Amino acid sequence: MARLINLIRRLAMSCVATWVYAMVPLFGHVAEAQEWPKQQPIKILVGFAAGGGNDVFARLVGQKLSEKLGQTVVIENRTGAGSIIAYDATARAAPDGYTLVVAPFGATIVNPAVYTKLPYDPAQLLPLSIVASFPFVLVVRSDAGINSVADLVAAAKAQPDKANYGIPSVTFQLLGEQLKQRTGAPFEHIPFRGTNEVLQAMLSGQLMMSFVDPGPLLGHLKGGRVKALAHSGSTRFALLPDVPTMEEVGFKGVSMDSFMGFMAQRGLPDAIAKRFENEFIAMATDKEFAEKILHHGLVPVGSTSKEFAERIQREVPMWKEVATKAKIQLQ
């Protein structure tokens, strides 16, 4: 009997010890979450140069986060390779709530769809929230005699040698290829370094059409030298309420709702991830913040982490299919 009692005691002690060791990482995460964000400044990595749209957006968000969290937020530009460098650095950072990355549509959806290999595993990144969105606007020269998307498609088929469009990145190319695949119009892409260069090329008569982002476009539309035929969003865009969606003008299936969001690392404590998510959602209803980003061609969204993750799962395969048909593959 004494041996049996001792055996039971040893087994009980072993179970307690095993439970304690198993819980140590959890207790560590709880303590870490309780101390956050007091220990050090929070870094937001931006995959593009200072002064650009991603950088300006990050600074507006960073200022708001700093106010809400009571901690300094530092913007760090890790430029190059369409945010791949910034995403890789984020994926390798400790999951402690002190490193985030600006997550634009191109880096989040398009890169995994067109690159044969990335230096990081996209599954290492945790979607936190889509904070803002915007469509791409299909524009032509005002004096081109093209008054609708149907006119544009007809003109491209009638003059295939002039059927082209400008692209500042592969994201715009995918949208152009989607239009090409849906309509059979023989559009060919011409690469440019930025949207402003695309617009200048259009105004000089080098391009038949192009999809462009709203920020650089608004002044040209007011000047009357370019005409907006439709945009790629799923609903009307607040800054251009009179411009219809592609679906509204009869071209269902030509759609791209671009966005700006934030991601962190897998393994981030749930309490910290939830706090970030809540703060980003709150920004969408903050009137002052909404007015600031509207000035830059963005509308507030404030999605949940789950909604963001679902978009990634749904859209990466869709755009990969478009890229495969267009033979777009990057290394």
Image: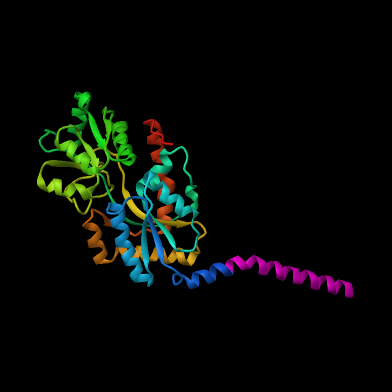
User: Would you place residue 88 above or below residue 114 in this image?
Assistant: below
**Considering depth in this image, is 256 or 168 the residue closer to the camera?**
168
Instruction: Reply yes or no: does residue 5 show up in magenta.
Output: yes
Give percent across and percent down for residue 80: 37, 46
**Considering depth in this image, is 22 or 193 the residue closer to the camera?**
193
Color theme of the render: rainbow
Which residue is located at x 50 percent, y 52 percent? 124
Q: Quadrant of the C terminus?
A: top left
Q: Quadrant of the N terminus?
A: bottom right
Q: Is residue 208 left or right of residue 14?
A: left
**Considering depth in this image, is 254 or 227 the residue closer to the camera?**
227
Give percent across and percent down for residue 160: 22, 24
Most common secondary structure along the magenta stretch: helix
Q: Is residue 183 left or right of residue 270?
A: left
- The count of marks equals 0
Residue 324 placement: quadrant: top left
Residue 161 placement: quadrant: top left
User: Would you place residue 325 above or below residue 265 in this image?
Assistant: above
Magenta highlight range = 1-26
Give percent across and percent down for residue 317: 43, 41
- One can see residue 275 in this view: yes
Give percent across and percent down for residue 140: 17, 37
Instruction: Reply yes or no: does residue 170 show up in magenta.
Output: no
Residue 163 placement: quadrant: top left
Which residue is located at x 49 percent, y 73 percent? 34
Which residue is located at x 34 percent, y 39 percent? 170
